[in-house]
Amino acid sequence: MLQIVIEKSFKKDVNRDKKSGKYSGKDFKTLKEIISSLQNKDSIHPKFKRHPLKGRMKGYESIHLKSDWLLIYKIDTTYLYLTMLGKHTQVYQKYK
């Protein structure tokens, strides 16, 4: 089981998305389930479009929780780093 490292940007993103009212309790439940699966090194259903990122974000991966709500994270041998959460524009503008 991987240890979770929650980065400051991820905490801010979660708080922003909770306050926005755009995401339901069910959406956040899905987020928790995905994080748990990643932590336990379980497979992720293909509908979530898990894929590695390129360019400046090489080494990170993305999961589509909804069509335009992404979880950005990084996994090494010991840790699961929760890095960012948000829409495409929110996530990728940080790396331009």
Image (tube, rainbow, N blue to C red):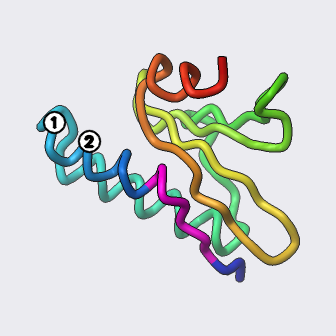
Give left or right: position of 83 versus 27.
Answer: right
Q: Quadrant of residue 76?
A: bottom right
On screen, residue 66 versus residue 21, left or right, reads: right
- Report whether residue 44 is seen: yes
Check disc 2 and report the residue beneath it. Answer: 17
Q: Quadrant of residue 80?
A: bottom right
The quarter of the picture where the C terminus appears is top right
Say few, some or many: other residues with alpha carbon within 10 Å of mark 2 (under 14 / 14 to 19 / 20 or more): some
Q: Position of residue 40 (x, y in %)?
A: 66, 74
86 up-or-down from 72: above or below: above
Image quadrant in which the N terminus is located: bottom right
What residue is drawn where x is 59% and y is 39%? 63
Question: In the rendered view, would you say 76 is above or below 20?
Answer: below
Q: Nearer the viewer, residue 69 or 94?
A: 94
Task: State the residue position of label 1.
Answer: 20
**Where's residue 73, x and y in %?**
65, 50
Q: Is residue 56 above or below residue 93?
A: below
* Mark 2 in CB contact with mark 1 (< 8 angstroms): yes
Q: Which mark is residue 72?
A: none
Q: CA distance from mark 2 to mark 1?
A: 5 Å
Magenta residue check for 66: no
**In the rendered view, does 82 fall on the left or right side of 22?**
right
For the record, the magenta segment spans 4-10
The type of residue carrying mark 1 is: Ser
